[in-house]
Structure formats: C-alpha cells, structure tokens
Amino acid sequence: MQENNELKSTLLNLGFGEKEAIVYVSLLELGKGTVSQISRKAGINRTTGYEILDSLLNKGVVNLSGKEPKAEYAAESPESLALYFKREADKAVERVRKAEDFIPQISRVYAKQNRPKIKFYEGTEGLKHVYEDTLTSSEAIRAYATVDDMHKALPNYFPEYYKRRAGKNIAIRAIVPETEFGLERKSHDTEEKREIAFVPADKYYFSPEINIYDNKVMIASWREKLGIIIESEEIADAMKKIYELAWQRAKEMNSPPADTHLV
C-alpha cells in the first residue's frame, strides 16, 4: 500500500493528473482489466474511467486489446513513461530525468502484478471472503457447484448472496449434481439470474465448488474449510474452455432423447 502511494505521488510530480495517477496505479495492480474492473478498483465511475483511460492511451502508457464489451486495458512497460515525457518537447529536461529514475521503482510493481497470484483463505470467514470476490465479476460466472454442501457449510449466507449477485446483474451458469435440494434451487433460476445444468449425482457428485470469472478461478473446499483464488489469465482461459466442454455435455444429459420412432 505504501509503495503504491509513493507511485501515485511520483506520477503527480511528473505531471499526471490525480485521477490519471490513481487509474494508472490501479491498472498496474490489476495487470489488465476492462473499464468496469479498472474503474471499480480506482473508485471512480465508469464514464470517468473511459475518459482517463483514453488520456493514458494518448500518452502511450497503456494499451487496449479486444472489442467492447470485453475490451481490456493493460499498462505498457515502465519505459513508456520516460518515452512519453521525452516526446513532450516543452517539458523540462529535469522531468525526463525523474521519469527515468522512476523506472526501477515502477518496474518492481509492474513485474509483481503481471504474474499469477494464488491466495488462500481458511475457515468460515475465508469461504465467505472468496464468495464476496465473485461479486466483482464483469462477466457471467461459470460454476461447478453442489448446492447441498454449499448450504450446509454456510447455511445463512447464500440467500442474501444470491440476491446481491442478481442485484449486481451478475449471471451464473452452474453444473450441478441432481439432488432434491438442487431441483428446489433450480426453481429460483430466473429470479437469481442462474442457469443450472444437472448431471447424475450417483456418477458425478463432487463437493468443492469451482467458480471461473474474469481472470480468476475460485475454489471453495467445504470439507476442508478452505477458499482459494487463483488469479491468472492463462489458467482462467484454459478453465473456461474446459468448462464449455463440460457444459455442452451436461446440457445434452438434460435434453430429452430424440424421437427415433419411424412412421
């Protein structure tokens, strides 16, 4: 936290506006992100986020990939800051020197934030913590979930969680072992912005829940009372592709058999 405050202070001294400095450091912390993710991290509204990111794009210190609504911004290498100030011919040479001296400091943060992160959380509060993180998702969550075990582990948590997730307009698709309680929960799919695909409980009953969203994979181990968040673009992308294969097969299991009767 102190290091990030120092980064913001240095960026302000180098000529960045206050919101530009906040957004830039927030983007460094995220590694990459959509306008919504970056704005949320920076504590500004989405419209302002677009304006500030456009300004940073024009400065050449961030880049943009993909198309809306999933376009993602990422910080350029730290050397881009010095290049920007060198291009500003009317700026003092002293400012360029400060920017060059600043590169080692910002490079440490850049390297730290652009590698995968794994966080562990223990106990009931830890399980709640990893679920709270899913409420930051900017896309529909892909989930493997056994609702029986979820509600046993956190009996008073999920009714309110479902309301808050739906209130944030975060949808979820879930592959769920078919149990009596699972069937009851499916009856609430519409109001809770969820789509369940059942799999046979006698063959595919599993306990841990896995949620895949943005660049994260969340695992909630009900029996071991352990929550894990893996933050990695590469791992999340692979898990999403694997999920789509599983989802397709689960949907086929839920489809009625084709009518093969010959007339």
Image: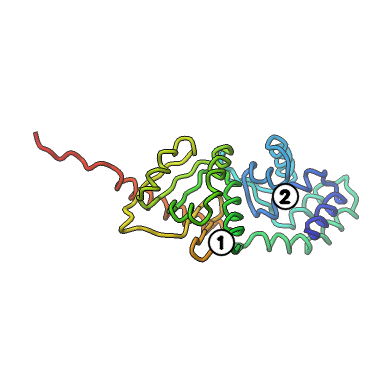
User: Dot 1, how many residues are within 10 Å of its Cα: few (below 14), some (14-19), or many (20+)?
Assistant: many
3D distance between C-alphas at marks 2 and 1:
32 Å
Q: Nearer the viewer, residue 138 or 68?
A: 138
Left or right of 241: which side holds 23? right
Q: Earlier in the sequence, mark 2 or mark 1?
A: 2
Q: Position of residue 138 (x, y in %)?
A: 58, 44
Asked whether residue 263 appears in the rendered view, the answer is: yes
Q: Nearer the viewer, residue 23 or 219?
A: 219
Q: Residue at x 47, y 49 (%)?
A: 142
Q: Nearer the viewer, residue 109 or 216?
A: 216
Q: Position of residue 187 (x, y in %)?
A: 40, 38
Q: Secondary structure at mark 2?
A: loop
Image quadrant where one finds the C terminus: top left
Q: Residue at x 62, y 44 (%)?
A: 34
Q: Residue at x 34, y 58 (%)?
A: 204
Report which residue position mark 1 lands on: 228
Report which residue position mark 2 lands on: 61
Q: Residue furthest left?
A: 263
User: What color scheme is it?
Assistant: rainbow
Nearer the observer, disc 2 or disc 1?
A: 1
Q: Residue furthest bottom?
A: 224
Q: How many marks?
A: 2
